[in-house]
Amino acid sequence: MNTKTERLVVIGAGMASGRLLEHLTEEARGAFDITLFNAEPRGNYNRIMLSPVLSGDSTWEEIVIHDDAWYAERGITCRFGEHVIAIDRKRKVAVGQKGEVPYDRLVIATGAAPFILPIAGNDMPGVLTYRDLDDTNAMIAAAGKGGSAVVIGGGLLGLEAAAGLKARGMDVTVVHLMGHLMERQLDEAAGYLLEKDLEARGIRVLTRAATKAIIGKGHVEAVILEDGRILPADLVVMATGIRPETRLAVDAGLEVERGIVVDARMITSDPAILALGECVEFEGHLFGLVAPLYEQARVAADTLMGRESRYVVREVATRLKVTGVDLFSAGDFAEGEGREDIVYRDPGRGIYKRLVVEDDRLIGVVMYGDTADGNWFFDLIRDRTPIDEMRDNLIFGPAAAEGGAAADPLSAVAALPPEAEICGCNGVCKGKIVAAIEGGAHDLAAVRAATRASASCGSCSGLVEQLLELTLGDAFEAPAAEPICGCTDLTHEEVRRLIRATPLKSQEAVWQELGWKTRNGCHICRPAINYYLLAEWPLEYRDDPRSRFVNERRHANIQKDGTFSVVPRMWGGLTTPAELRAIADVAERYDIPAVKVTGGQRIDLLGVRAEDLPRVWADLNAAGLVSGHAYSKGLRTVKTCVGSDWCRFGTQDSTGLGVRLEKVLWGAWTPHKVKLGVSGCPRNCAEATCKDVGIVCVESGYQIGVGGAAGMEVKATELLAQVATEDEVVEIVTAFIQLYRENARYLHRPYKWLETVGLDWVKARVVDDPDERRRLVERFEISQSVYRKDPWAEQVAAHADEFAPLAEIRMEAAE
Amino acid sequence: MSWFDIGPVEALPMRGARRVRTPKGCIAVFRTAEDEVFATAARCPHKGGPLDEGIVHGRKVTCPLHSWVFDLATGEALGEEGRVATYPARIEKGRVLIDLSQLVMRGTA
Ligand code: SRM
Ligand SMILES: Cc1cc2nc3c(=O)[nH]c(=O)nc-3n(C[C@H](O)[C@H](O)[C@H](O)COP(=O)(O)OP(=O)(O)OC[C@H]3O[C@@H](n4cnc5c(N)ncnc54)[C@H](O)[C@@H]3O)c2cc1C
Ligand code: SF4
Ligand code: FES
């Protein structure tokens, strides 16, 4: 035993210093005369377990690590409830609120402090953070009064707070800035599953939501988001991250970056002072979980006892302590080249696993729903075990080293509840179809006869066949259907129906629930899925520009040299001198090399540089011109002829009707482009009879034709209806377009779609059934409430800077 | 190595790209869904399509002109004869850095 005792002062009685003291007092009892300061009026407790205390699953007594007796037995002088306010390095004293204590060596273990968003109202009564027992008790007290809580921050702490408050009966909303929850630990897929689980437990989750301010009179009443939404709140918990608690070290002149800088022996820039825990920074790393802190405690103890020991950063693993939520993440699943993914999904059971492999080693893992093998994977990561030989079955865990089962492609259909609608036309649910199959209907025709499922438009045939296969097993042989692309085994129609029936409202949901074989699709399926989602859920789904081809993302047509063409809308082919002047000015102002009259009765500005697009649009907007969507799978042109206004043969106002139709339909996204024509008489100068929808005016009214084509195929329209008034034309055409939007496969023009469903099927809905027609128009209008607006103006307002290069690099610096 | 700081990560759209101009041609800088960054020459080796305007999926990009697909890490065209130059890229403290020493050498050699 040492003869000379050393005076050791420890600032902070948290989890890191607690472990350090255990080592010192066990391995070198009596060697140190220890004084322990803690700002909290208590000693070391298991901070991690505050969440079970909050939710009521645990009590304070259960989470104390060191009680009074423990400190007394070891002769540690405790100064709890006392802040250290300064360190005087010259005189080697720690200055506490109640007096100084001299040291030979000093340990700083002040942990971290919650980061407070710099927004109005952040200090209002009712706004809490989540760090210590007092915060936890304050939350429990607030929850006792009921009402609603808003948790700002969807990371580990925020979600545990949310689950705890929910368990105590509050209405809880989590507001998260990023696109998915726990983005630092989880990828998008696992984040999606987590969000879904939390929502199923009644916790509302808002992602991509930025908090603007907290308001209230004397006590919080609501949280205001940047987008203007107002969330009523009786309690606000701010869990937006932590900052190393470095104030003492900064004041004392120690080297501090984001944390207190330490070397591998945990020594700061002053050799007499050590630091460990969340307050330190080591080789650029900060720490937020206990496992590495315990390793630091081991090293710091060795250093103090004069033993050689070095700290190395190791991978950490995260689990979330929310009952019933099973997630695990470890290692590195982002950044870097030469990495490959192994993905496994079992939609039926809500399971997702992803392994990241680099150089024949596992370097990262994310698991959701089934984390039993988490530690096994974690060991592979930490031990850097070569995985070459087990690679094929690695994802199935240690048990399956020799041959595991692949995900069942039918599991998405198997997972549907009995009441899920399979046949939309005839309203037949899964349960009824399965009952029919069990009752002896053993092929598609028999199911059709028994239930009418797939008897109309037929787009659910694939799903019915899958139900046959599921119910009958090998006894049923499904005819091969063509999947959308290599990312899935499902066809367009099947995916569409499942989006509706399940229901699925995000791309992540589609990839996950339908067992996509790739992480986030490809250039073939992504635009299709994006369309299906926005057509199905216009209000809930947000269009994803990153899943669109360049033209639709840039709102201009790309040219072979990378420039763009710009076509402003000319309603029904009409223009004015002022518009023409504005177009001419723009062409000169931006050196636009070509101006051409298009085959669609408007003017094309060709060869516009990408970075000029926002200004070109702004100038055109100023003259009242909007996008002509010459680039979109959406409404293009409505060609008209002069009609009764001028033409000696004109029977009706074809120009006016064309303008009216264009104003109703513009902006709508459709499976493929849609073009209309309105001719004033059967001489048909607007070429209406080869358009997707063509109206020919006659003395007694209007003939509405559909399914024309004049591109790679040429086809005349077929008569859908003949009506007497313009109002009827507008209603029937709108209903037809909506039916097409809801049912056609992506990239099928109306004539292609009509080949599969038949004109009679369309007539039955759009012409013969006025209620159905009205419902179609209503749904179209709901969608148009989002999409009937000028995308150019929007791009100019919100994204103009994205059209210029991000940076300009001059090489001199490098040469 | 000559690392250039081209801006904050958030300036790159998730599953998207931005263009960086240099005296030796434009570079496309990509950000994947997993927050990885990659840099390649912006010109498609097929007929010069702007790769920064392509759809980014997994660690691949599809050229907007004729749908060649490139592996962002290696620059290889998948199923086609062709390759696009790649440059090291990384994220550090929220900033995107690209290393253009190869570009400099290629230009001065
Ligand atoms: C500009 C224009 C040619 C012109 O100078 O007149 C044009 C230009 C293009 N057409 Fe067209 N089409 C134009 C009228 C037509 C017409 C005539 C019409 O609309 O009355 C047709 C036949 C009718 C039809 O739509 O089928 C037509 C049938 C096509 C097709 C074949 C479609 C089909 O289903 O068979 C394509 C290819 C496609 O969409 O997949 C196409 C594709 C294209 C693209 C977008 C090719 C591309 O992807 O880059 C061209 C873009 C050029 C550019 O950069 O601006 N264009 N294109 C016309 C623009 C009309 C407008 O004001 O919006
Ligand atoms: C609710 C919650 C759940 C968590 N869940 C997990 C989990 O599941 N897994 C995991 O690994 N980690 C979890 N953590 C993180 C983990 O608790 C921390 O990483 C760990 O407690 C940090 O230990 P520390 O000793 O560095 O700091 P702390 O434990 O914070 O201790 C620092 C102490 O220093 C005191 N102090 C600060 N300044 C002064 C001063 N000037 N004078 C005197 N005293 C001072 C503070 O009052 C505090 O008591 C969780 C944290 C919280 C809050
Ligand atoms: S016909 Fe249409 S697609 Fe073909 S070159 Fe002319 S504009 Fe382009
Ligand atoms: S230019 Fe890129 S694929 Fe043709």
Image (cartoon, coloured by chain):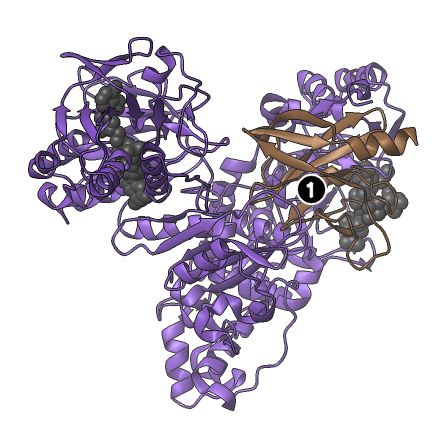
Chain colours: A purple, B brown
Q: Residue drawn 47% across and 53% down? A: A382
> Which one is nearer the viewer's eye here, A767 or A59?
A59
Can residue A603 be seen here? The reply is no
Q: Residues within 10 Å of mark 1 (few under 14, many from 20)?
A: many
Q: Residue drawn 19% across and 22% down? A: A39
Can residue A398 be seen here? The reply is yes
**Under tag 1, what secondary structure?**
loop
From the top left corner, tell me how far across and down residue A548 is, in percent.
65, 44
The relative height of residue A5 versus residue A194 in the rendered view (above or below) is above
Residue tagged 1: A632
Is ligand 1 closer than 8 angstroms to the Cβ of mark 1?
Answer: no
The relative height of residue A360 versus residue A90 in the rendered view (above or below) is below
Q: Residue drawn 48% across and 52% down? A: A189
Quadrant of the picture in which ligand 1 is shown: top right
Chain to which the residue tagged by mark 1 belongs:
A
> Which one is nearer the viewer's eye here, B92 or A461?
B92
The amino acid pointed to by label 1 is: Ser
From the top left corner, tell me how far across and down residue A640 is, in percent.
75, 38
> Which one is nearer the viewer's eye here, A339 or A108?
A108
